[in-house]
Amino acid sequence: MSDNVNDSLKIRSLNFVAFSLALDESTDTKNTAQLAVFIRGVIADLQVCEEFLQLVPLRGTTTGEDICDAVLQCVCQHSLDLSRRVCVTTNGATAMVGEKKGTASLLVRHYEAVGYDQAINMMHCIIHQESLCAKSANLVDVMSVVVKVVNSILSRSLNHRQFQVLMDEVNVHYNDLLYFCEVRWLSRWAMLSRLCDLQQDIATFLHQKNLPHTDQFSDPR
């Protein structure tokens, strides 16, 4: 199915009169740097196609040059015609928007070096709806309790080891908790999702260790 989707997108891309790329480089909760590449193209009858093109893992450094190389490799794999590219959109990271060594600038220079004279528009930044929602939603009461509980378990070696033993004994899918990082917009969701799955087990552990906030985790609501 994956091959069929890729082939279908590649065939559709060949008919683009013009297209633009959107690039979003971020680091997930496992410290893996990933580059998400999206394409938006228009065909002759003005039908617009917007698709997720590829997720590229970035190993080692994530400089503007590294990201630029990853983008060019992605373009080559999908047989995109660079002469039809009219815009590149990035997030606001320095590696993306730097005037000299930013990915967008390097892509434009590569474009000019291969002989294309069509102007390339550069825009930033990509804003995630989930990130905006997390910032506007009032989750202070929830997050303050959750962060304290996770820190009381993970930041103390004995508690952490005993919690992992308990998770092994009850044979749950996860055997550990996740820290919350304000900078990484996905970590709030990952942390809360993991806590919801382990709510009863966490309540049991807090009760056994006589730690605070046992009542909140024992409440089924």
Image (cartoon, grey):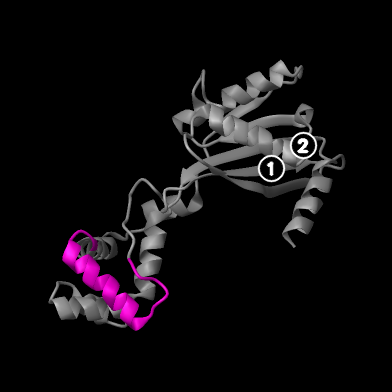
Q: Residue at x 51, y 41 (%)?
A: 59
Residue at 76% across, 16% down = 115
Label 2 secondary element? loop
Left or right? Give the position of 140 relative to 158.
right
User: Magenta: predominant secondary structure element?
Assistant: helix
Q: Are marks 1 and 2 in contact (CB under 8 Å)?
A: yes
Numbered circle sitting on residue 39: 1
Q: Amino acid at mark 2?
A: Leu
Give coordinates of residue 159: x percent, y percent.
19, 68
Q: Which of 172/191 is in front?
A: 172
Residue 85 position in % (x across, y down):
73, 31
Give residue 80's mark: 2
Q: Is residue 177 above or below residue 61?
A: below
In the rendered structure, does residue 140 fall within the stretch colored magenta? no
Q: Give coordinates of residue 22: x percent, y percent.
A: 61, 39
88 w.r.t. 191: above or below: above
Residue 37 figure quarter: top right
**What residue is at 41 percent from the left and 60 percent from the top?**
189
